Amino acid sequence: MTLAQRSNESGSANQPGNDNDDHAPGFVDAVCLPDEENIADLVRRTERMAILVVLGMGGWLMLVPAIYLVLIHGI
């Protein structure tokens, strides 16, 4: 079995494989929030979504005993 040698395309042999380029666009660049009003709006929407998720999960958990009874007793 022979090993194939991989070429280093970046030109630097000492550079790690996960160098995390600073110039690469990320999530922070995608969300452009220039003033505090937009930040407050984003926080408000996130908080509402979190509350809805928690209430939805609680609702489904309350249905589990009802589904169990229906399946066990064949109602």
Image (cartoon, rainbow, N blue to C red):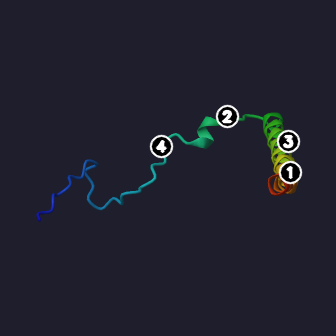
Q: Nearer the viewer, mark 3 or mark 2?
A: 3
Amino acid type at image mark 4? His
- Distance from disc 1 to disc 4, alpha carbons, whole Å, reads 49 Å
Residue 22 or 54: which is nearer the viewer?
Answer: 54
Residue at mark 2 to residue at mark 1: CA–CA distance: 41 Å
Which residue ends up furthest to the left in the rendered image?
2
Q: Amino acid at mark 2?
A: Cys
For marks 4 and 2, give the CA distance: 16 Å
Residue under numbered circle 1: 63
CB atoms at circles 3 and 2 under 8 Å apart? Answer: no
Residue at the farthest bottom position:
1
Q: Earlier in the sequence, mark 3 or mark 1?
A: 3
Residue 33 drawn above or below residue 12: above
Secondary structure under the numbered disc 1 in the rendered image: helix
Q: Return the x and y of residue 28 as percentages of the image width and height.
A: 62, 42
- Choose mark 2 or mark 1, whichever is in front: 1
Q: Position of residue 62 (x, y in %)?
A: 88, 53
Q: What residue is disc 4 on?
A: 23
